[in-house]
Amino acid sequence: MDKILSQKLNAAQYAAVTYTDGPQLVIAGAGSGKTRVLTYKIAYLLSMGYEPWRILALTFTIKAANEMKERVASLVGRDVASRLWMGTFHSICTRILRQEAELIGYTRDFTIYDTTDSKSVIKHIVKDMQLDEKTYKPSVVLSRISLAKNQLLSPTSYSSNRDYTMQDRFARIPEVSRIYSEYNRRLKACNAMDFDDLLFMTNTLFKNNEEVLRKYQEYFRYILVDEYQDTNYSQYLIVKRLAEPDNHICVVGDDAQSIYSFRGANIENILTFQKGYANAQLFKLERNYRSTQTIVNAANSLIRHNRGQIPKAVYSELALGDRLQLSTYMSDRDEGKAVAQQIKLLYRQGYDYESIAVLYRTNAQSRVIEDELRHLGIPYRIYGGMSFYQRKEIKDAIAYFRLAVNSQDNEAFIRVINYPLRGIGETTVMKVREASRMSGLSMMEVIVNPESAKLDVSSATMKKLTAFCELIQGFGERVATTDAYEFATMMLRDTGVLREAKSDTTPEGVARLENLEEMLSGIHEFVEQRMRDGISFTPMTEFLSEVSLLTDQDENQDDTQARITLLTVHAAKGLEFKVTFIVGLEENLFPSQFCQAPKEIEEERRLLYVAITRAMERCYLTNARQRFRNGQTVFSSPSRFLKDIDTCYVQQTQAMSSYNFRPIEIHANVSSVSSSNASLSSNSKLKSVSKQVGGNTSKTRKEVRSEWKKQDRVVHKVFGAGLVLDVYHENDNDKIDIQFDNVGKKTLLLTYAKLVRE
């Protein structure tokens, strides 16, 4: 076996594999062969006489466990490999709990609730406790309970923990502790556990039953843990208890790739391993087999700025390679155009699409990239997710827009009737749908004409349905006279969709809000571009037509076609590509605006380290001087992390724009409303409703405050010098009339005119 190992492993890998005298920490730098070491170590232990069922190997994903099993099987045979205790923390804990369930008050056939099940239980508890369902959202409450369980806090401990209860009060959800207690009671009554319980109950089992703990300590003779930097407190304690007293344990990980604190991961577990285990030996895998020397050196120069780390000198013996390319663009649209164009060029140079990836900090950033890739006909896939316009929150928002445009759109009606929650349940929706089918009316018309449609609901329910109908009709009255961006902003605000998203402070909730805000940015961009093209008014129907074409492309993609990969940096961990683009390297984006504390900034730096080390041959870094975010153009500064990378490893290009910005001129001969608005006629079938949805629809001129006055002499960068004739507000826009000396009279949108005094 030694001869085989010496041939297959480098010196550092060999030393880590063959050491079995006590606890060991293997720090595996990016691309250093971590899985290879774990695989060969298991094979080595088997060759030393360890029985396969006495080896416990813990991973974080089913994919990692299966990959390791296959590799071990190729070395020792499938029969031997099948008898290993190898799997995720949750799967291994489930096996233990099935055997010992009676000791903690469960039967062996206990049910495991998934996230959907857990949210459903919490939803019913909130309702039964007569709490505000909009405030106590199941996702938010479950996130708090999950955090508590991973810190091994019972409901009683939670309620007496000042930090947790203060956080709940600050978030205006002070009843979480009470919900937590009832949630656990109901799960126990159903003989059920959630995912976090699998770890929590295993810890409880070991803590309260010394004989059982001793049984498993004696049973498992060697323990291996993959991705140790990602362990939380509960996982750390399970491993520590099982390893005692002999501490035949090997943990493998990389502190520089600890990026999951939002899931409860604690980097201190790996940083303090040697303190927690007497005589622990440290092994470093520092040779990178993935990336060029330049990419490795650039990543090293970045991560050395972190204080909390285990020092290591990762190196590569591959070619020196190209320097990282750093480019700054005027806008996120320019950034997207440039990335797409460079990908096209790389493809012509011989790079396959599947060898290229675009990495971003947040999922919302994919929209602009997707738009530009579609424009150039570049196939792509969203790794670990779905394309922008297929995301639930985006489809929900678009359903609202569709219903305002066409009140007979039953599918849109069904999607939004109870979103956000209005107390309109599935039974009511089924009754409205059946009445629609029987009467031949749309579901909205059924609500307007309940008697003729024979709709059988209570007066209280009818009141809720009518309120929804009035809300939608109010929007329908405005959709033809309000530009798409203003309308979308108004509708998402007044329906409570934005408020609903903002109230969810979980990472998933934050991502949904970012996606909604990005959609609004996209609509604003769409309207703006049409203005540049001389179209002064863009109704919602035009945007919906554009979106329908985009979503149709999503649904008709050829799954066999090679594509580039779009993904978040978090999702990219463990993957590699010949070429990577890391976009949006700006302050308040990367690092995130939500990360300000020193430890948070260090994790964000580790995140960029992970991003850079995904690249094998080429790495492109990009940022933009401005982005449209949260309803306004935000001017950005480059990410602080760019200064951390030694300049000798970076080639910086000059800021550029893919198109020249030109003034937005209003042409009198352009119709203010597209002919496609003919579809709006369906709204006329609804009876008049007095409810008015906010906003000024007046088409008369109004005075507007401005630095420019009549008779001012101004200069425009395209049209030259001229005299201001008038400044006014009309059709929801501030406008300015100017008599230019050379080109005559022009009407410009004041926002985009960019005038200076003569």
Image: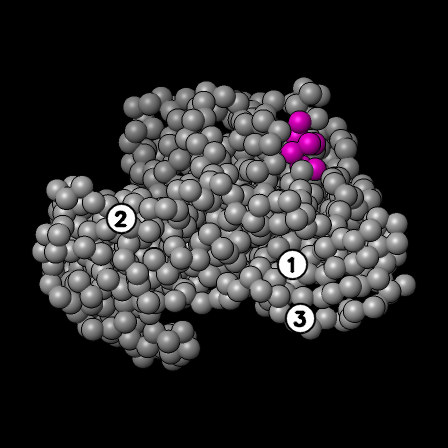
**Residue drawn where x is 33% and y is 23% of the image:** 78
**Residue drawn where x is 44% and y is 37% of the image:** 548
Is 334 positioned to the left or the right of 452 in the image? right
> Which structural element holds mark 2?
helix
Q: Which residue is mark 1?
A: 633
> Which structural element holds mark 3?
loop
Q: Check the image and tell me how it is coloured.
A: one colour
Is 493 positioned to the left or the right of 526 in the image? left
Is residue 668 something one can see in this rendering?
A: yes
Question: Residue 70, image x and y in percent?
Answer: 39, 26
Which sits in the foreground, 3 or 256?
256
Q: Which residue is mark 3?
A: 704
Crowd band around label 1 with a 10 angstrom C-alpha radius: few (<14), some (14–19), many (20+):
few
How far is disc 3 from disc 1 in space, using C-alphas? Answer: 21 Å
How far is disc 3 from disc 2 in space, using C-alphas? Answer: 42 Å
> Which structural element holds mark 1?
strand
- Magenta residues, as a range? 338-344
Quarter of the image that includes the C terminus: bottom right
N-terminal-most mark, 3 or 1: 1
Q: Which residue is mark 2?
A: 414
Is residue 178 covered in magenta? no
Question: Residue 112, image x and y in percent?
Answer: 21, 49
Looking at the image, is mark 2 or mark 1 nearer the viewer? 2
N-terminal-most mark, 2 or 1: 2
Is 646 positioned to the left or the right of 595 in the image? right
Image vertical order of residue 369 relative to residue 137, above or below:
above
Amino acid type, callout 2: Ile
Amino acid type, callout 3: Val
